């Protein structure tokens, strides 16, 4: 059996920054996959940054 967890995201359309983000993603068919790909990129970026910082010491 698969265990699923949800992490909802809200956009305040009265806030210009949130509205810009919402407008960017509103037509994405698989928003969940899109968000997961951005999270995966962030994880990879942070791993690379940590390696560089450790290498400098």
Image (tube, rainbow, N blue to C red):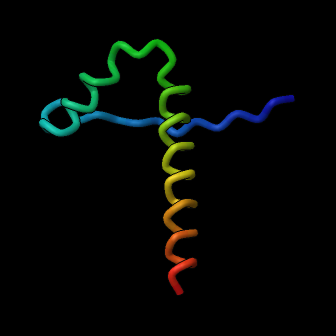
Residue at the right extreme? 1
Question: Total marks drawn?
Answer: 0
Q: Position of residue 6 (x, y in %)?
A: 58, 36
User: Which picture quadrant has residue 50?
Assistant: bottom right
Relative to 2, say whether 42 is above or below: below
Q: Quadrant of the N terminus?
A: top right
**Position of residue 12 in the picture relative to residue 41 (left or right):** left
Q: Image quadrant of residue 47?
A: bottom right
The residue sitting at 33% across, 18% down in the picture is 26
Residue at 53% in and 34% down: 37
Where does the image place residue 3, in percent across and percent down from the top left? Answer: 77, 35
- In depth, the one of 33 and 1 nearer the eye is 33
Residue 52 % position (x, y): 52, 70
Residue at point 51% right, 81% down?
56
Q: Nearer the viewer, residue 47 or 1?
A: 47
Question: Compared with residue 32, is residue 6 higher up or lower down, i.e. above or below?
Answer: below
**What residue is at 49 percent from the left and 49 percent from the top?**
42
The picture places residue 46, in percent across and down from the top left corner, at 51, 59
Image height of 29 relative to 4, above or below: above
């Amino acid at each position: 059996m698969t265990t699923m967890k949800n992490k909802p995201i809200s956009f305040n359309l009265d806030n210009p920054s949130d509205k810009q983000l919402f407008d960017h993603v509103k037509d994405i068919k698989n928003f969940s996959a899109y968000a997961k790909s951005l999270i995966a990129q962030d994880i990879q970026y942070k791993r690379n940054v940590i390696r560089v910082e450790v290498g400098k010491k």
